[in-house]
Image (cartoon, grey):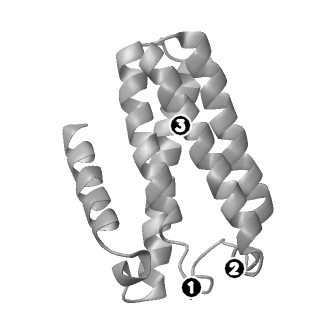
Amino acid sequence: MNRLLLAAATVASIATALPAAAQFAKPEQAIKYRQSAMALQANHLGRLFAMANGKVPFEAKVAAEQIEIVAMLNKLQFAAFVDGSDKGDTRAKPEIWSQRDKFNAREAKSHEDVAKLVAAGKTGDFEQIKAAVGAVGQSCKGCHDEFRKE
């Protein structure tokens, strides 16, 4: 877990230090970057969903740790939707770039829902975390339904 947090912190540092377009020498790098961030986010959200659905015991400390990781990854994934990264090995629909305002609204909603999850995580209250993680899941689903190829 500590190595994952260190790696994620390193990626976050790099991501915030440079403008998004400067991070990726080639569009394929942006695609791999966002796919990696999304895969990690799905993994950590999955742990929260398992707690929320009673498949694993709820532990407030563990949930708070997972939420922190999700919050960071949520920011990182969107930084990689740069121009030119709409072609190649990606399931991103071209509408991301042709309907950028709509996509940006989905991104803002995602950040808003994750911020609410962070706040819920700080309470340690199971019911608040459960509701907030459900909202994040719906936010992810909404964006995927509109902007991801099957």
Q: How far apart are the two marked residues, 3 and 1, measured between alpha carbons?
A: 27 Å
Q: Nearer the viewer, mark 3 or mark 1?
A: 3
In the structure shown, which secondary structural element does the residue marked by tag 3 occupy? Answer: helix
Of 56 and 92, the residue lying toward us: 92
In the structure shown, which secondary structural element does the residue marked by tag 2 occupy? Answer: helix
In the structure shown, which secondary structural element does the residue marked by tag 1 occupy? Answer: loop
**CB atoms at circles 2 and 1 under 8 Å apart?**
yes
Report if residue 47 is visible in the image.
yes
Which image quadrant: the C terminus?
Answer: bottom right
Which image quadrant: the N terminus?
Answer: top left
Identify which residue is drawn at 72% across, 56% down. Answer: 143
Labelled disc at residue 145: none
Q: How far apart are the two marked residues, 3 and 2, measured between alpha carbons?
A: 25 Å
Report if residue 150 is visible in the image.
no
Earlier along the polypeptide chain: callout 3 or callout 1? 1
Q: Nearer the viewer, mark 3 or mark 2?
A: 3
Which residue is label 2 attached to? 97
Of 12 and 49, the residue lying toward us: 12
Left or right placement of residue 69 versus residue 41 in this view: left
Which residue is label 3 attached to? 115
Q: Where residue 47 sits: x, y (%)?
A: 49, 30
**CB atoms at circles 3 and 1 under 8 Å apart?**
no
Which residue is label 1 attached to? 83
Q: Quadrant of residue 97?
A: bottom right
Of 55 and 44, the residue lying toward us: 44
Earlier along the polypeptide chain: callout 2 or callout 1? 1
Asked if residue 54 is positioned above or below residue 1 in the image, the reply reads above
Please, what is the three-letter code of the amino acid marked with disc 2?
Answer: Trp
